[in-house]
Amino acid sequence: MLIKKRKKNLEIDGLIALDKRLRKGDENRIRIEERLYNLQAGFGGETQYDKYVTEFKPRYPHAILHDVTLCEDKIFFQMDSILITPAFIVISEVKNIADKIVVKSNPLQFIKEHSNGRRQPLKNPIVELERKIYLFENWLKKRKIEIPIKGIVAFAYNNELNIEETPSMDIMFTYEVAAHFRSLPVAKEILSKPEIHSLARKVVNSHQEYNPFPLIKRYDIQPAHILPGVICPKCNHLPMRWMQKKWICRPCGYTGKNDHESALKDWSMLIKRSITNREFRYFTQLENRNTAKKLLARSPIELQGIGRSSKYEIILEHFIQIEEKQETIH
């Protein structure tokens, strides 16, 4: 039973917004685009894993949770996927690497071999898994739960995999995961069906949602590097202009009434969670204070304070819910 789905990676949205608001020659652009590419590739591999895992439908009770972050002894650890069965738990580490992978022994190394022959050492996913298993075991013991924990490394790409010596943990492709799970014997019941569901709920309730914002602090970017303005959703021109009670994009002719809300979302992801009337006017390139006040009043944000000290709290979840509803309609 799927208990926790994998959510959209919000940092991807933030980096897309950041990339649009950096000048073409900005010194930060290369590293931002590289990070965005890696995150998108990683998320694509994880969703591919999720698709294949749906084929795992055993007769015994179980729980599957995707993308879980827990805290143990003030140490945060993230698990790509967890399978809870009556006899054991499996933590999956999903990797999205397109080139040939060589797994060497003595010492254990993962090496990425590019098509041009260049070899690049990778961070050892088995060491990562061992750390997560250790922390999860301690997390469970504090809740008086003792059950064996296994680990697997799943590669999303069906690339060449050269394993010189069998490592301590199973390595496979994502399309093989469901069959692998089916092959694991459930010989001894440690957790009953109610206990599995109870543990799954405890994990979900203890999950720490990852919040990378604001990105200018995370990536050490000066606010002056962020281009202000409302971005046209049709042609990405920046800035649009507020004229005749609507946003107008002169290059492509697009018009809209609520496109400043995307600018508010960008501000919250890149700069900070709150915004004043003055900051809103700067970021949307509006001149009239009263127009800004009216647009802010009809936006999904919360006013705090009165008079000159007032500011608006931007709740990112509100914008996400609106976008999800719009996607459902379309």
Image (tube, grey):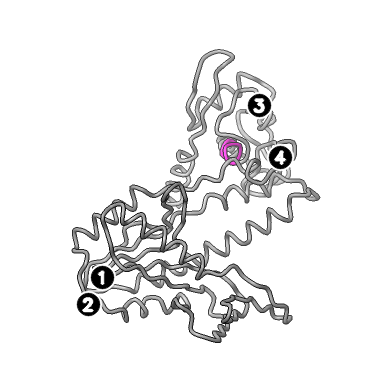
Q: Residue at x 70, y 42 (%)?
A: 221
- Tell me the quadrant of the picture where the N terminus can be found: bottom left
Q: Tell me the tag on residue 87.
A: 1
* Residue occupied by mark 4: 226
Q: Nearer the viewer, residue 102 or 80?
A: 102
* Residue occupied by mark 2: 187
| Image coordinates for residue 31, horizontal then vertical, percent | 71, 55
Q: Earlier in the sequence, mark 2 or mark 1?
A: 1
Number of on-image labels: 4
Tell which tag, 2 or 4, sits nearer the viewer.
Answer: 2
* Residue occupied by mark 3: 281
Query: What amino acid is labelled 2 in the image?
Result: Ala
Query: Where, by quadrant of the figure, is residue 4 drawn?
Result: bottom left
Q: Residue at x 59, y 14 (%)?
A: 308
Q: Which residues are magenta?
A: 264-269
Q: Residue at x 49, y 48 (%)?
A: 210
